[in-house]
């Protein structure tokens, strides 16, 4: 692994940890980190997926992630999508994609099943 790859991996880990902390702080449910880098076929290194219990909580989760990442790491997302209906909010941090779902949308799109070959790590709600 080159020095550049090590630096990128470390930066992705810091970003991932910050995002998970922000989600746990606002009581996200079923938080999963998926490492897609092992597949070597995607444009992203990681997915972070969680469930919100309501549209209001989904928006709060999104706001908290964006705020914490900006405050702690000085990084802004390249794109945020889905806030208008807040059933599936996507926050794009280039190599790390955050998916905030309502339960029925998470079940319907089943990203964990679609990317079943990725390494998965689950995080408990605090």
Image: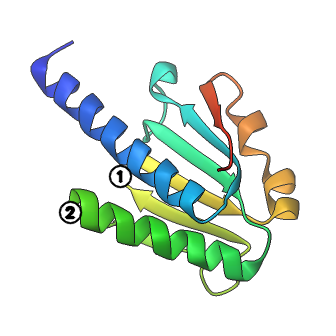
Image coordinates of residue 114 in percent, x first then y, are 73, 37
Give the vertical position of 63 relative to 52 (above or below): below
Task: Report the front residue among 4 and 114.
Answer: 4
Residue appearing at x 23%, y 34% in the figure: 8
Image coordinates of residue 76 in percent, x first then y, are 29, 67
Q: Is residue 68 visible?
A: yes
Question: Are the residues flagged by discs 1 and 2 in contact, CB closer than 8 Å?
Answer: no
Residue appearing at x 37%, y 65% in the figure: 68
- Mark 2, residue position: 74
Helix, strand, or loop for circle 1? loop
Q: CA distance from mark 1 to mark 2?
A: 14 Å
**On the rendered structure, is 25 left or right of 94?**
right
Q: Furthest residue to the front?
A: 126
Give the vertical position of 54 relative to 39 (above or below): below
Q: Furthest residue to the bottom?
A: 84
User: What is the crowding at mark 1: few (fewer than 14 residues within 10 Å), some, or many (at least 20)?
Assistant: some
Residue appearing at x 44%, y 41% in the figure: 44
- Mark 1, residue position: 94
């Amino acid at each position: 692994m080159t020095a550049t790859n090590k630096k990128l991996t470390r930066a992705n880990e810091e970003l991932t940890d910050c995002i998970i902390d922000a989600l746990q702080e606002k009581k996200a449910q079923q938080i999963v980190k998926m490492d897609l880098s092992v597949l070597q076929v995607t444009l992203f290194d990681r997915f972070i997926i969680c469930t919100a219990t309501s549209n209001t909580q989904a928006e709060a989760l999104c706001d908290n992630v964006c705020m914490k990442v900006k405050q702690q790491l000085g990084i802004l997302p390249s794109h945020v999508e889905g806030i208008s209906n807040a059933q599936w909010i996507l926050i794009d941090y280039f190599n790390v994609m955050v998916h905030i779902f309502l339960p029925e949308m998470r079940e319907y799109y089943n990203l964990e099943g679609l990317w079943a070959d990725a390494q998965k790590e689950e995080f408990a709600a605090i």
